[in-house]
Amino acid sequence: MFPNLLLKRAHLTPERIALRFKGEVWTFQQLYIEANEFAERLHAKGIQPGMRIAILSSSNAELVIAIHGCLQLGCELVMLNERLSEVELNYQLHDSNPDVLLVDNVERKISYRQRFSFDDVHSHERKVYPIESDWSKERTISIMYTSGTTGRPKGVRQSLENHVMNATGSALHLGIHPDDCWLCIVPLFHISGFSILMRSVLYGMTVSLHTKFDPEKVVDEIIDGSATRMSLVAVMLQRIVSVLENRNEYFPDSFQSILVGGGPVPLSYLERAIERNIPVQQTYGMTETASQTTTLSSADAIRKLGSAGKPLFFADVRIDGNEKMGEICIKGPHVTKGYIGAAESKKPLIDGWLHTGDIGYLDEDGYLFVIDRRSDLIISGGENIYPAELESALVKHPAVIEAGVTGRQDDKWGQVPIAFIVVKEQVTIDELKDFMKTQIASYKLPKEYYFINALPRNGANKLVRRELLKLI
């Protein structure tokens, strides 16, 4: 058993600042009071402990209150990505089958059999519910969708133990300071953002929440000295460094660290960051591990360029197979115990190890180097884009027979998706672009389209994506 996180934190440090958002602040006591009120209003609308609630919202204070309110009521959360298309959202709703869908505003163009807006909840009466002072460590806190190597989204269960042990391992690596403030510029529907909320109640740490990433505002807040930590991806780091260079400014010594995920950070970014007094720590993790598994210290950022660091205290990492390089496998209390919906029968662990599908190696000092993330995976601006998902969407068009998608290097985004199409009748690129906008999220859209006569395939008639760029 673990304590009710927010209830315990509100008891320990009631007057400490929990949240800052657009000039407003909430102490942990205030956050608990508002979350409890939200839970009572949900309960009055018929929501019972143990129910599953899907949430579709941008990052804002209302979402933080709703998350904690649902958890107080004893519900499990399905965190939906607001950037997805209606087709993608409908699939995840069908697969997760929540009891209710919560949306941040009534104008959201997504329907469900039982749907409440935040305003609907706030305008309802209140009904007392049983407050649990202790929570089972096996309890599912959150469910987030991550694509498998085939591109089909899988709903990943993240238990209370997963979140607590991940946050504890991170704290043992980074340290905890009474005046810490984590600048949250990553979305709360991602594990990178959600994990910051979990750390906040465990550490007693302030979260400064931004709805969107604005490098100018981020730099302003850090120069002001009010933020000490931040999580982001490499392309965001590059934009922050550019702002500092244009202003000829530096991060203050009070700033502790930036955790950078979504792929190795280029040497040029690191060198420029160091010149601006930015302590960068590269990290490796995934939805199935409730965020971090390994983290590189800022002191090793140049010496171990490209490394994701060493495993956190409770995590183990090994390389599968007899060769130096192979599939990265992870073990620890932060690793998911399973999936939901269509993927429920898929067991994430083999002999206690999560087989990630990522290829890497451990050097002689035990530092992890990630070479390829699921071989064909495209990482664009820190977002995972799976070629099979885009190919499946493309062949839905009546003019398309076959499609192949691969990633091409891009100075701004790291990689961008490029599509290769075999057609049976004439279709324009603009028509394909318009069609794809109805099928997938905007950040996944192919940046270029090429018409070809046949896709490259191997002897087993399987598509060989690495050969696609040679056709240009």
Image (cartoon, helix red, strand yellow):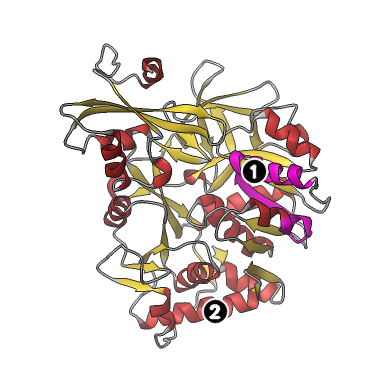
- Is 388 magenta? The answer is no
Residue marked by disc 2: 34
Q: In which quarter of the image is residue 399?
A: top left
Measuring from the top left, give residue 388's x and y in whole percent.
32, 33
Q: Of 19 and 219, which appears nearest the observer?
A: 219
Q: What residue type is labelled 1?
A: Arg
> Which residue: 61% across, 54% down?
214
Reply above or below: 384 against 319.
below
- Is 226 magenta? The answer is yes
Reply above or below: 384 against 79.
above
The answer to whether residue 224 is left or right of residue 440 is right
Q: How many labels does the image show?
A: 2
Contact, mark 1 vs mark 2 (Cβ under 8 Å)? no
Few, some or many residues within 10 Å of mark 1 (<14, 14–19, 20+): some
Q: Earlier in the sequence, mark 1 or mark 2?
A: 2
Residue marked by disc 1: 239
Q: Of 256 and 355, which appears nearest the observer?
A: 256
Regarding mark 1 in the picture, which secondary structure is present there?
Answer: helix
Measuring from the top left, give residue 340's x and y in whole percent.
34, 51
Q: Give the range drawn in magenta.
A: 220-247
Regarding mark 2 in the picture, which secondary structure is present there?
Answer: helix
Q: Quadrant of the N terminus?
A: bottom right
Q: Which amino acid does label 2 sit on?
A: Glu
Measuring from the top left, give residue 88's x and y in whole percent.
32, 50
Few, some or many residues within 10 Å of mark 2 (<14, 14–19, 20+): some
Tell me how far mark 1 sits from mark 2, CA to CA: 36 Å
Q: Give the foreground label among 1 and 2.
A: 1
> Which residue: 69% across, 42% down?
242
The answer to whether residue 130 is left or right of residue 174 is left
